[in-house]
Amino acid sequence: MSIRGLSTLSFLFLTTAQLLSQNFEWQQRASMPAPRWGAGTFVTTGLAFVVGGRSNGVDYPQMWAYDPIANSWTQKASFPGTPRRLATVFAANGKGYYGCGITSSSTYLSDFWEYDPLANSWVQKASFPGGTRYNTWQFVLNGIAYVGSGISTGASGPFLSDAFTYDPSSNAWTAATPIPDQGRHGAIGFAMGGKGYVVCGRENSLSFLQDFWSYNPATSSWSAMTPFSGAPRSSPLVFVYYNDAVVGCGRDGSTNHYDVWAFNPSLNSWSQIPSYPGATAMAGTSFSIGNRAFGGLGWDLASDLSHADLWELVKPGDVSIDEQVVESAVRVHPNPASADGVRITASEPGLVSINVLSGEGRLVQTWSFANAATVSTAELAPGIYFLHWLQGDAGGIMKLMIH
């Protein structure tokens, strides 16, 4: 299979303004082996894990992992709890977390579970303290998860406005600062640039929302941002693409939306980009791995059909570099590696610069050397990392596994 390489320094480090000035397009990727809507998605170890969700009136426990480099899906350990949809899901410190949600019998849940991708196993953790609910928002900052809002009393509300944090290291929940507004459900949360964001949803009057909020963990406070420029909606696709947020699709009553918008945080403004070409993507999946962004699956309310298609947002003209060619230019050994370090060598003379990204796309290390070097990996936790390398006008991406 091939991966999308980066050929020049200016291409690899495009600014937000440059990105938004270019054309984008959606390219179809391998469909998930089973259609789903309302599934939970978390990203860790360089893979996107899609768990649970609903199809043909049935909620399922299966989980599938998507590898963006191989463009393939692999079935993982099924969720051992009650099958559910519209659950709370996030990744923190290399593990995935999944809980709350609603079942096929319309039972609301508050249990919470942890998935270890290295052991491919699940273990139950402390239950969510805010009571049973589904359709929450969530994001993770500095290894701490923030979860809030949702439904606990029926689709007509009233909807919840509270918020909690979860610390995986202590398996403890704590009350947090809620969004300073009324309750909502179907809002989507994400983290970007050290802050948390929540966008869209449906509020207690049953109106759909465009509002957009930013959370600053240093002050434990929320700020109103420029509202989403598309029509009000709930359950949209949301992901971070380079340093911008992308929001689109979703539903307003019985209307499926397909328009997509990019948010520039430095300008606090929105720009429209190409519409989503897939089936529906309402209550679908959306995720970023490194600087690659994907959306898909979802539900069509009118036909009651769930979908399995997956699409990647890309810039036309990206240079495709075969993985074997990339590794012949810059090599890392051993791979998989231990905490003892790795030897990195380039086939051509000259300075090599490498950015090390975690599976969640966070910059965790920077290396720079001439031709070859042995670098320490002692500060890298076990998992999968992406090495974005540059040497002169050449560049590419490698995957490094740490045991």
Image (tube, rainbow, N blue to C red):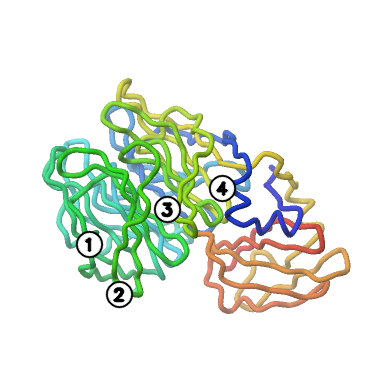
Q: Circle 1 sits in a helix, a strand or a loop, which is it?
A: loop
Image quadrant containing the C terminus: bottom right
Q: Residue tagged by mark 2?
A: 170
Q: Circle 3 sits in a helix, a strand or a loop, which is it?
A: strand
Task: Determine whether, in the image, residue 261 is placed left or right of residue 183.
Answer: right
Q: Residue tagged by mark 1?
A: 178
Task: Determine whether, in the image, residue 262 is placed left or right of residue 100.
Answer: right
In whole angstroms, how far apart are the C-alphas of marks 2 and 4? 30 Å
Q: Earlier in the sequence, mark 4 or mark 3?
A: 3
In whole angstroms, how far apart are the C-alphas of marks 1 and 2? 22 Å
Q: Residue tagged by mark 4?
A: 67
Q: Earlier in the sequence, mark 2 or mark 3?
A: 3
Q: Circle 4 sits in a helix, a strand or a loop, which is it?
A: strand
Inspect the image, locate mark 3, and give the three-letter code of the amino acid beneath it. Phe
Q: Earlier in the sequence, mark 1 or mark 2?
A: 2
Q: Position of residue 145 (x, y in %)?
A: 33, 64
Q: Earlier in the sequence, mark 2 or mark 4?
A: 4
Residue count near mark 1 (Cα–Cα under 10 Å), binned few <14, some 14–19, many ≥20: many
Q: Residue tagged by mark 3?
A: 42
In whole angstroms, how far apart are the C-alphas of marks 2 and 3? 20 Å
Task: Determine whether, in the image, residue 166 is placed left or right of residue 360.
Answer: left
